[in-house]
Structure formats: C-alpha cells, structure tokens
Image (cartoon, rainbow, N blue to C red):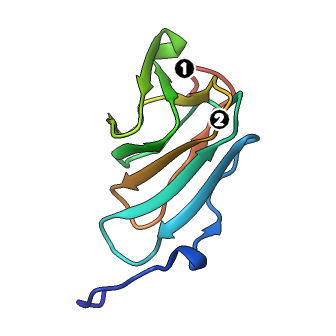
Amino acid sequence: MPREVQRVKSTDIKTSTGQTEGMIRQGAIVDMSDKVCASIMIAKPHSASAVHHHGEQDTIVYAAAGHGTVVSEGGGKRQDLAPGDFALIPAYAEHQEVNDGDEEVTWIITRSGRVPVVENLERWGTS
C-alpha cells in the first residue's frame, strides 16, 4: 500500500457495497488500505436493513445525522443512536439497522478490513 495521504472527495463517493431496500451504502475508503475501510450508510425513513453480520470485521458506527437504531441479540435488544453517538459491532454479531423516523439517518461506518463485508441472513440465528 502507498505510504502517502490519500483523499476521496465527496463527489467521488458512489453507491456501492451490499444494498438492502431502503438502505443506501456508499463506499468512501475501499480497497485503499489493508487494514480498514469506511463507508456511509443512509437509511431512508421507515426502513430497516436485512438481518446481517460483517464476517470477521469489527465495525464502528458514528451517527452523523438522524435518529436510528441498532437491533441485536436475536431482535431482542434495541440501541438508539442520536447524532454524535458511536456503536461498536463485533465481528459476526448479527444485527439490523432500523430507521423508525420520518427523516433520513446517516451513519459513518469504519470496518477492520480492506473492503466492506455484508452477509445478509434469511433470519436471526442463521449465520
């Protein structure tokens, strides 16, 4: 990997990575480092991702705008994120992103891998 500072302009960020109805995932820093990648997740109002995990990747979420929820533990635990909040989602942790509100939710996602891994599941407990 190059040992120089690299920049990705906002105008160069494109919708990519695994998509779910109502969720827009945009790769920002992808395939640029051997150790980390970063993306933007926008959740449309009244939407939810599929139940999924991120394989071997630990995930850090930063809530940039809107009020969203991370659902985990088989659907039994809900943790709300407001702007400025962080969440850590460990590798292989099944979870779901939910936007129950009337406004878009924007989260900045950083993962411990070169490219984002999103393994959508049929239901809880099938990973």
Residue 15 higher or lower than 67, as above or below: below
| Identity of the residue furthest to the top in this view | 76
Residue 68 higher or lower than 109, as above or below: above
The percent coordinates of residue 14 (x first, y second) are 64, 70
At 54% from the left and 14% from the top, the residue drawn is 75
| Identity of the residue furthest to the right in this view | 21
Asked if residue 7 shows in the view, the reply is yes
| Circle nearer the N terminus (2, 1) | 2
Q: Nearer the viewer, residue 71 or 124?
A: 71
Contact between marks 2 and 1 (CB within 8 A): the answer is no
Secondary-structure class at tag 2 = loop
Which residue carries the number 1 mark?
125
Q: Is residue 106 left or right of residue 108?
A: right
Residue 10 higher or lower than 106, as above or below: below
Asked if residue 89 shows in the view, the reply is no
At 65% from the left and 63% from the top, the residue drawn is 16
Which residue carries the number 2 mark?
103
Q: Is residue 82 left or right of residue 101?
A: left
| Identity of the residue furthest to the left in this view | 3
Q: Residues within 10 Å of mark 1 (few under 14, many from 20)?
A: few
| Nearer to us: label 2 or label 1 | 2
Q: Please, what is the three-letter code of the amino acid marked with disc 1?
A: Gly
Q: Nearer the viewer, residue 44 or 117?
A: 44
The percent coordinates of residue 47 (x first, y second) are 70, 31
The percent coordinates of residue 28 (x first, y second) are 49, 68
At 37% from the left and 45% from the top, the residue drawn is 62
